[in-house]
Image (spheres, rainbow, N blue to C red):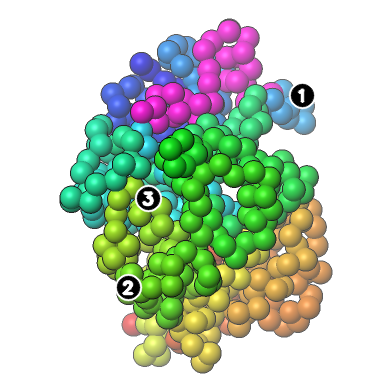
């Protein structure tokens, strides 16, 4: 088939494009505001990218248009459609479907799907599970909302038949394995269900749950209902099925979701008395299964959030036959995902380097967790400068603005890029006093950071977009400072 993907540079749709290409389909696509790492991955695959959503693209005459949830029926100020291509598809009566539905029908059928859901940690935990299974020679397929450094690509088909786990047989594994990041965001403008209801997992990880996506959910209860829809799709247990839910035992929202009804085997993770718990620092800890030491993880990752992600990944891998001890050891070789506290470079200054990081954090809880993890690693004496961009739909609406000052507390200084916001960023950060500054352009932001940066600083840039290439600009500006060798 020839498929043409609308919104191809999104993390999900870009991964879908890679899977379609690997399956043997001809793949083209379109998008706007293209930026790495997805644009680089698509170019490396030889997938033709078209800028924008012009109606003329119907002349490609693909067998199927696959529509990303970025596409809508919205109109510009002058009344013209924002997505002219979608209007042309509808007018022509051409075949179209959503990304999640195409994936479910063309890739996931017949596979044992391991789906990772939650407000935070989906990408990292999905990558962890894929790496554990790869280390066990199970050759999983996967679709991750980022680029795992262990694999170098965000998606692959994996084995077409079930693989033995080095002698660790598992009746729970019903086919070749596929690990997928399971997003609660809506499927498409014509299908308002959460993406994850299409995946029908046999193993489902529920990492955590709090309010997000204020553009489509009225309140937390609405998201909890969607999570329960996911639970309804997981097989039962015992003589009636082989499904498993892996659930954060510390999360009150998830407890409410389970109380709506649960038909599957459940394994909890987090603090004791959860089934899977940890003892030790987040970078060097014992893994306990039902109170007994069953493995050990020693790695370069930081933060309690990653420790919890590891427990979830280990519990999911156990369900498909990978022993806890093996899974824990495998994580010692896990290299995380691009844009998860990724070091973009450092510049020597007066004998001590200034280090610049890139991180995907955009929700206040994720910002706080990222900075807490780095502070725990560096110690109280190190200086952390946090540059952030409220870019997600929820943050643009100002729904979480009251939590921003709290989220930035672990940083010594904070710099907010407030371009395009309809709410008052200085007012939201006023309680931080001189610790916070606001800029309305990237150059202004870089200038503010350069004024305050000094030898030994750690600068963390946080956004779920390209952030105007601020990381590269900062590094170059630091190199151009007088006295830098």
| Visible residue check, residue 260 | yes
Q: Which percent across, then down, holds residue 296? A: 32, 73
Q: Which percent across, then down, holds residue 170? A: 29, 45
Q: Residue at x 55, y 60 (%)?
A: 248
113 to the left or right of 33:
left
172 to the left or right of 237:
left
Q: Which residue is mark 2?
A: 296
> Which is in the foreground here, disc 1 or disc 2?
2
Nearer the N terminus, badge 2 or badge 3? 2
In the rendered image, residue 435 lying in the magenta stretch gets the answer no
Q: Which residue is mark 1?
A: 79
Q: In what quadrant of the picture does the N terminus appear?
A: top left
Nearer the N terminus, badge 1 or badge 2? 1
- Tag 2's secondary structure? strand
Span of residues in magenta = 81-110
Q: Residue at x 38, y 77 (%)?
A: 285
Q: Residue at x 39, y 24 (%)?
A: 106
- Tag 3's secondary structure? helix
Q: In what quadrant of the picture does the C terminus appear?
A: bottom left
Whole-angstrom CA distance, mark 1 to mark 3, is 53 Å
> Which is in the foreground here, disc 2 or disc 3?
3
Q: Residue at x 45, y 28 (%)?
A: 104
> Which is in the foreground here, disc 1 or disc 3?
3
Q: Which percent across, then down, holds residue 318? A: 35, 54
The foreground one among 337 and 30 is 337
Which mark is on residue 319? Answer: 3
The foreground one among 463 and 372 is 372
Whole-angstrom CA distance, mark 2 to mark 3, is 18 Å
């Amino acid at each position: 088939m020839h498929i043409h993907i609308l919104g191809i540079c999104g993390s999900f749709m870009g991964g879908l494009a890679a899977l379609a290409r690997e399956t043997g389909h001809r793949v083209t696509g379109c998008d706007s505001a293209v930026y790495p790492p997805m644009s680089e991955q698509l170019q490396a695959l030889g997938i033709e990218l078209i800028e924008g959503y012009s109606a003329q693209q119907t002349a490609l005459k693909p067998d199927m248009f696959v529509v990303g949830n970025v596409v809508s029926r919205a109109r510009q100020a002058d009344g013209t459609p924002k997505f002219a291509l979608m209007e042309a598809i509808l007018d022509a009566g051409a075949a179209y479907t959503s990304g999640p539905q195409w994936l479910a029908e063309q890739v996931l059928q017949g596979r044992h799907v391991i789906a990772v859901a939650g407000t935070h940690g989906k990408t990292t935990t999905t990558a962890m599970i894929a790496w554990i299974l790869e280390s066990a020679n199970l050759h999983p397929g996967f679709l991750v909302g980022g680029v795992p450094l262990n694999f170098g690509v965000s998606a692959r088909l994996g084995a077409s038949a079930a693989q033995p786990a080095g002698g660790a047989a598992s009746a729970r594994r019903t086919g070749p394995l596929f690990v997928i990041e399971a997003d609660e965001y809506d499927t498409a403008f014509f299908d308002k269900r959460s993406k994850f209801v299409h995946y029908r997992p046999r193993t489902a990880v529920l990492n955590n749950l709090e309010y997000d996506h204020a553009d489509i959910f009225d309140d937390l209860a609405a998201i909890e209902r969607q999570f329960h829809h996911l639970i309804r799709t997981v097989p039962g247990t015992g003589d009636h099925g082989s499904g498993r839910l892996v659930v954060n035992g510390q999360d009150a929202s998830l407890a409410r979701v389970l109380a709506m009804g649960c038909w599957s085997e459940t394994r909890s993770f987090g603090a004791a008395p959860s089934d899977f718990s940890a003892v030790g620092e987040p970078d060097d800890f014992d893994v306990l299964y039902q109170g007994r030491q069953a493995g050990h993880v020693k790695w370069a990752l930081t933060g309690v959030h990653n420790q919890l992600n590891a427990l979830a990944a280990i519990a999911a891998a156990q369900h498909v036959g990978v022993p806890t001890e093996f899974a824990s050891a495998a994580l010692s070789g896990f290299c995380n995902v691009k844009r998860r506290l990724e070091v973009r470079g450092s510049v020597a200054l007066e004998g001590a380097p200034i280090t610049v990081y890139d991180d995907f954090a955009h929700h206040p809880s994720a910002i706080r967790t990222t900075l807490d993890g780095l502070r725990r690693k560096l110690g109280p004496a190190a200086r952390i400068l946090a540059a952030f961009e409220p870019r997600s739909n929820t943050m643009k609406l100002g729904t979480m603005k009251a939590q921003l000052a709290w989220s930035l507390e672990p940083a010594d200084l904070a710099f907010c890029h407030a371009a395009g916001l309809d709410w008052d960023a200085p007012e939201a950060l006023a309680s931080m006093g001189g610790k916070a500054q606001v800029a309305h352009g990237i150059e202004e932001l870089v200038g503010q950071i350069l004024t305050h940066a000094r030898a030994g600083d750690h600068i963390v840039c946080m956004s779920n977009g390209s952030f105007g290439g601020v990381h590269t600009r900062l590094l170059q500006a630091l190199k151009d400072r007088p006295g830098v060798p």
